[in-house]
Image: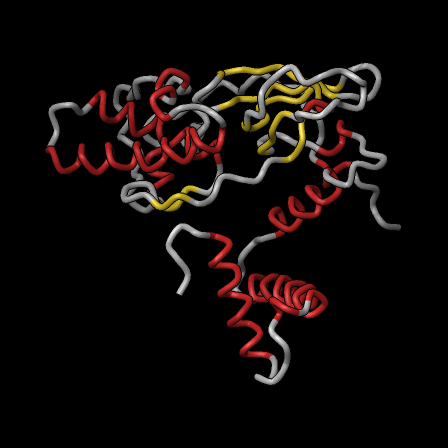
Amino acid sequence: MSDPGDPDAAVAAALDAYQRELLPRDVPHHDTDPALATSLIGSLIEQLARYAAQHGLDVHDTLDELHQRSIDRGGVGIDPVHNFRLGAQVQFRQEEITTGAMPRYPRWRGFITSLTEAPGGDARCTVRVPAVADTVHATASELEPADPLLPVATRTAGVVHHARDAEETIAVLTAWLDRNADTTPVACQEKLDDVERLSTPLAAWSGGQPEQIARHLPRVPEPARRTGTPAADTSGLAPVARLAATGFPQGPTPIRPDDPAPAPVTRLPDRSKRRPRRP
């Protein structure tokens, strides 16, 4: 059995099991046959996609992201404007970039919060680096895809899969703790434990320190309830959605019909919308 927290061992164990189910035992092990390993991995990915479709699970974004990372890391004929998208987990290049300039930042990791086209084809990106900096401005050519934050299991917010979601969840938990300092010790302790569970791997991933997470958290405003308006029922939401619905501005809180419409924001179109339609 693979060691808890070791994704490489978990993947190897899954591939072992897949080979045992498909192939006779006298076939060489994939560890010693690269061609067999390549074939098994491709087959497993196809079967996982088919399994997801049969069970109504949407993995298109994941497959699209994997394909995009492969293109980004190819290094030939790359157009950075069209490669990155909002929310992409990236890191700062350490080698000389295509323009000949030397790197301006350490190998921090973060996620893109805004994209703006610029003259010459490069894109201006705003990157949020948890535990390091709220806002870092860079061009797309200074960035490259980062290995994503590994899933983190929490007791009060479920499994968190993305650096952005980890930081938002920490912010929501911290705001809740500030507002409920006099609540039961058990509830506080569970949330405190989850803050630590998320802060440690997030800081290690971004290149910061866990104790610096709190200094760079996005602001969570105090929840305001309208007079005569009942509180939203969040009992049927998943744990992460319930946390986000308590007041995080980017969470899934529903927009009421009488709320003013948000001002339009100019963004690059999603890559899927930029692709030409088939005739």
**Residue 56: percent from the left, percent from the top?**
54, 60
Colour style of the rendered protein structure:
secondary structure
Image mark count: 0
Q: Is residue 174 left or right of residue 77?
A: left
Q: Position of residue 14 (x, y in %)?
A: 51, 65
Residue 90 horizontal/vertical position (percent): 60, 31
Query: Extreme front residue here?
Result: 32
Relative placement, left or right, of 9 versus 41 is left
Residue drawn at x 37%, y 15% is 215
Is 177 situated above or below 242? above
**Residue placed most toward the observer, 256 or 122:** 122
Residue 181 point in image, percent of width and height:
16, 23
Quadrant in the picture for residue 202 = top left
Residue 274, picture quadrant: top right
Going by the image, does 181 lie left or right of 20?
Answer: left
Q: Outermost residue, right direction?
A: 279
Image quarter where the N terminus lies is: bottom left
Q: Is the residue 79 above or below the residue 275 in the image?
A: above
> Which picture quadrant has residue 231?
top left
Question: For the point 55% across and 28% down, which residue is it?
Answer: 109
Q: Residue at x 57, y 40 (%)?
A: 147
Q: Is residue 32 above or below residue 195?
A: below
Residue at image coords 49%, 65%: 13
